Amino acid sequence: MANLVEDEFDVSIVSASALPDSRNVSKLIGRCERTLVAAPDYLARHPIATVNDLPQHTLMHTSSSFDPPSGWLAEIAGHATASAELAGQFVVNNMQALRVALLAGAGVGAVPTYSVVEDIKEGKLVQLFPEYPLQTINVFVIYPSRRFVDAKIKTFVEFLTVSLKEKLDLRIENLAAVDASDHSSEQPQAELQA
């Protein structure tokens, strides 16, 4: 987590299960579902039949992740062998790079649902083992503790809270309902135009 005062940052957005004690002010702006995905190309070359196969695959995560592969394997413990030695890990330094590597068929990764929803809908990525949901990630906005908070910081925090909530709350199981409502709203327009 950035040292906001020394590094001269007004606001930081942090994803974590919990925050360390600090003199900063923090506000929980949402919780983000994560999903386990891989590219169809990767799965064609390296089939995954059960969750017990996961430790034998290239497991991908970000270097800043609070939850490396050993963590999400432990979440489905009883279903996968959490203590098993991992065949390989692929580590990148940001979530967008992880998404690009997943799309290129580099391995299996647990990523925020909102970052791969379109890829799943378009068949570019495949959701693995949805019956074993992963722990959600808390998303916090953090700003330095001051006697008087600047109006620009207060406004930005309010904006983040409203604008990110819908995206962060997106869940895979809601996609079918969203798709159905999209198609039902398109139907009457087509009839009217005809």
Image (cartoon, helix red, strand yellow):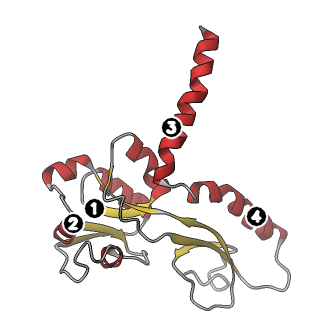
Residues 175 and 151: in front is 175
Crowding at label 3, few (<14), some or many (≥20) Cα neighbours within 10 Å? few
Q: Are marks 1 and 2 in contact (CB under 8 Å)?
A: yes
Pointers 3 and 4 in contact (CB under 8 A)?
no
Residue receiving disc 1: 108
C-alpha span from label 4 to label 1: 35 Å
Which of the two discs, 3 and 2, labels the residue nearer the N terminus? 2
Q: Which mark is residue 179?
A: 3
Tell me the amino acid under the disc marked 2: Thr
SS under mark 2: strand
Residue 58: numbered disc:
2
Residue at mark 3 to residue at mark 1: CA–CA distance: 26 Å
Marks 3 and 4 sit apart, C-alpha to C-alpha, by 29 Å
Marks 3, 1: nearer the viewer: 3
Above or below residue 84? Residue 38 is above
| Residue that label 4 marks | 158
Quadrant where the image shows the N terminus: bottom right
> Based on the displayed image, in which of its 4 quarters is residue 2 positioned?
bottom right
Residue 155 in the image, given as x and y percentages of width and height: 79, 64
Q: Which residue is painted at 21% across and 66% down in the image?
A: 58
Q: Position of residue 96 (x, y in %)?
A: 43, 58
